[in-house]
Image (spheres, rainbow, N blue to C red):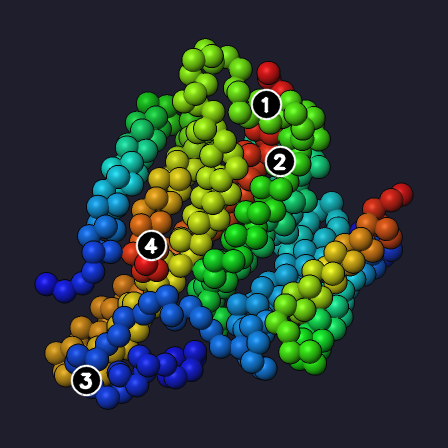
Amino acid sequence: MNPRGVSVRDLLRSSSEGGGFVPPSSGDFELPPIFGDNVYTTKPIALVFLSVILISVFFIISSRKAAVVPSKLQFAGESVYTFVRNDLAKDVIGHDFLRFVPYLFTLFTFILVNNLFGIIPLLQFPTMSRVSFPYVLALTVYLVFHYVGIRKQGAIKYFKEIMFMPGVPKAAYILITPLEILTFFLVRPLTLSLRLFANMFAGHLLLLVFILGGEHLLQGVIGLKLISPFAFAIGIVLTFFEFMVQCLQAYIFTLLAALYIAGALADEH
Amino acid sequence: MANREENAMWSIFGYLLSGLLFWGGIGYGLDKWLGTAYLTLIGLLVGISGAIYLVWLRFGRQ
Amino acid sequence: MEGTLNLVGFGLAAIGPGIATGLIFAAYINGVARQPEARSVLQPIAFLGFALAEALALFGLVLAFVL
């Protein structure tokens, strides 16, 4: 009945009526491999490949035969691109922004499409709820902004400016320097990745609770059966809410990546 | 957009995908043959970096 | 009473972000009320602040499940 195969939860549920509901937990996020018995052909990986293919094909098709008066597909592709280019790159990074537009655009569309897989029927799994994907994305952002800072200001000067912020009285360095080191090297990539992961994990879990709960209620006594439409209705409302959260999280991730790059490029000192 | 540029876009896409699939497939096959668990990942990384390098060689330098 | 201490932890962890979200959007509403033209300038900042505050609440939720 659920597309993920038989689980302990199904067995419990089928063997009792009112008291056998096992709520979804983090075990529900570990999906079996599609063929073979390794860890490389599971559903999230297939979804990631699918997202890359979808994004590439969409943008290639929407930008060929580019006319001055755009068709609808070209307008859709162009509006996503100009959104990332203007609102995210140009306003945040400033005058040197064109180099980073491909990277930020890739981040934004990749995260957005992968998030949206969470509410598309038949695919219903946001791949960013497997924690390794946000970790790797945050790792690339981390490498990019440190590399940009080192290229622009030289390694020693860059690290010196992180650790000893100018314009601060020398006595406060004891307080501020450990904080800055922790922030720059540990907290930023960690919160960047965990924010995305936690939002997607929590959203998927919420949807699972209400929809599976509604399904379970449907098998109960008549009193419970009458309540189950409310569970499904809340599931529908939460799907719209999830859509908003998914778009927001893609935007926030890219915005913070742009902010970190802008911070590394800043030359006000 | 000119036909040549559109061909370029499709070929870039094809390079990336085929690099991943080919070297990932080699890594996967080696994994099954040798019984290891990590060669697929190494194959995928080699494939994607080779594909990006090839794209840069063909299209990035003008 | 059943349940784990995780739930109590998550409940406590959700107080801060709840207040923070209220403050952020109160400031946004105030700003837009005083000057409606500033709406499009303030909106990205409001959403950025909201996502940053919400991140902490979600850390609590995820840790309540995982640990």
Which amino acid type is marked by label 3? Glu
Query: Where is C45 relative to C13, above or below?
Result: above
User: Measuring 59% from the left and 16% from the top, which residue is drawn there?
Assistant: A269
Select label 1 or label 2 by which is in front: 1
Q: Are marks 4 and 3 in contact (CB under 8 Å)?
A: no
Q: Residues within 10 Å of mark 3 (few under 14, many from 20)?
A: some
Residue A55 point in image, percent of width and height: 63, 59
Which amino acid type is marked by label 2? His
How far apart marks 1 and 3 lie (CA) works out to 65 Å
Q: Residue under mark 3: which chain is it in?
A: A
Which amino acid type is marked by label 1? Lys
User: Measuring 71% from the left and 37% from the top, which residue is drawn there?
Assistant: A99
- Residue A179: quarter of image: top left
Q: Which residue is tagged 1?
A: A160
Q: Which residue is tagged 4?
A: C63
Q: Secondary structure at mark 4?
A: helix
Q: Which mark is residue A17?
A: 3
How far apart marks 4 and 2 lie (CA) works out to 29 Å
Q: Do tags 1 and 4 sit on the same chain?
A: no
Q: Do tags 1 and 3 sit on the same chain?
A: yes
Which amino acid type is marked by label 4? Leu
